């Protein structure tokens, strides 16, 4: 599988850390040419040094002009986009709905929902002209269940699941596949920040308690385990898979 993506052009948003970085490294290791997108310039520059010939593009995925800029940067350098990991997201503030501001809600939806829509819209235009392509959106197990004090994030990730289904249907006549991954508890910066919000005095105890509830191994997953699923969904091995949202949660939602 070392050359599974040889000659393919891949765009990854939220590429400077977490799932985005793990997927970028995996795709590059299997031969893809990478366009790395993130709004954090310094971490993005550091990530790009780890991947030969990667093109870093600083962009805010919630802004239409920025989205068009990363798509045009990819097409300008490589002439096409074959693979798209539509991943950038934020966690937002944990609080009951009655205590959330409109700004709290809008901030999360702008990145996690509108950003996914804008990415799909721009990349699908390119892929429709090519009549080929594969896309994976980052949803979450929060996209299939509720969670008290996490309403904006849950709402946005439910929307990602819906957008994935719609895009799969729109892309199918053009040979484009669109799927989503729905990670559960994965050991990332975001997960650590959430445990700190739940119990600032002892976030490690929250981490341990959360891990203990996972049936498969009583542990958090790793970004590399998510990357393995994303890579498969983007590959030709998943040629008959589209419109799917794949849980990666150690049987937590079984």
Image (tube, rainbow, N blue to C red):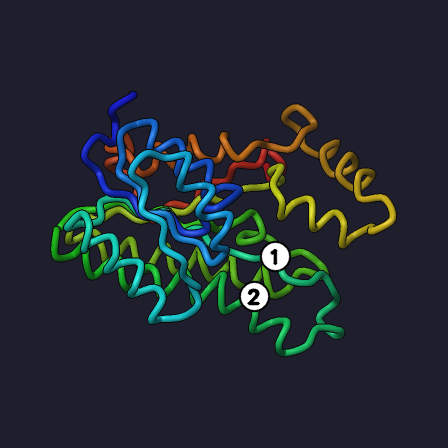
Q: Position of residue 93 (x, y in %)?
A: 68, 63
Q: Which of the numbered marks, if any, corresponds to residue 233?
A: none
- Callout 1: SS: loop
Q: CA distance from mark 2 to mark 1?
A: 7 Å
Residue 130 in the figure: left or right of residue 139: left
On screen, 9 above or below 79? above
Tell me what residue is drawn at x 13 percent, y 51 percent: 131
Label 2 environment density (alpha carbons within 10 Å; few <14, some 14–19, many ≥20)? many
Quarter of the image with the N terminus is top left
- The image shows a total of numbered marks equal to 2
In the depicted view, which residue is nearer to us: 153 or 162? 153
On screen, 133 above or below 51? below
Q: Position of residue 98 (x, y in %)?
A: 74, 74
Q: Which of the numbered marks, if any, corresponds to residue 91?
A: 1
Q: Quadrant of residue 252?
A: top right
Tell me what residue is drawn at x 36 percent, y 55 percent: 57
Furthest-bottom residue in view? 102
Q: Quadrant of residue 26?
A: top left
Q: Position of residue 122 (x, y in %)?
A: 27, 63
Furthest-top residue in view? 1
In the depicted view, which residue is nearer to us: 248 or 62? 62
On screen, 188 above or below 42? above
**Which of the marked residues, 2 or 1, is nearer the chain's N terminus?**
1
Quarter of the image with the C terminus is top right
Tell me what residue is drawn at x 78 percent, y 52 percent: 198
- From the image, tell me which residue sits under label 2: 108
Tell me what residue is drawn at x 87 percent, y 48 percent: 201
Marks 2 and 1 in Cβ contact (< 8 Å): yes
Q: Position of residue 207 (x, y in %)?
A: 75, 38
In the depicted view, which residue is nearer to us: 246 or 192? 192
Residue 98 in the figure: left or right of residue 137: right
């Amino acid at each position: 599988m070392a050359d599974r993506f040889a000659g393919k052009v891949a765009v990854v948003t939220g590429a400077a850390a977490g799932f985005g970085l793990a997927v970028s490294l995996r795709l590059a290791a299997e031969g893809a040419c990478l366009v790395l997108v993130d709004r954090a310039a310094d971490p993005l520059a550091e990530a790009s040094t780890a991947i030969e010939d990667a093109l870093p593009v600083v962009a805010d995925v919630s802004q239409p002009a920025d989205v068009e800029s990363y798509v045009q940067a990819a097409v300008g350098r490589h002439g096409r986009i074959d693979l798209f990991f539509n991943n950038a997201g934020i966690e937002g503030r944990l609080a009951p709905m009655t205590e959330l501001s409109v700004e709290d809600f809008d901030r999360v939806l702008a990145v996690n929902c509108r950003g996914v829509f804008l990415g799909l819209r721009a990349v699908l235009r390119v892929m429709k002209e090519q009549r080929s392509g594969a896309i994976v959106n980052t949803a979450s197990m929060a996209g299939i269940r509720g969670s008290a004090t996490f309403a904006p994030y849950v709402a946005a990730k439910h929307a990602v699941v819906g957008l994935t289904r719609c895009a799969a249907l729109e892309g199918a006549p053009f040979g484009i596949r669109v799927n989503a991954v729905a990670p559960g508890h994965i050991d990332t910066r975001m997960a650590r920040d959430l445990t700190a919000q739940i119990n600032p005095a002892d976030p490690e105890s929250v981490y341990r308690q959360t891990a203990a509830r996972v049936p498969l191994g009583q542990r958090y997953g790793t970004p590399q385990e998510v990357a393995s699923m994303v890579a498969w969904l983007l590959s030709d091995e998943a040629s008959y898979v589209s419109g799917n949202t794949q849980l990666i949660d150690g049987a937590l939602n079984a």
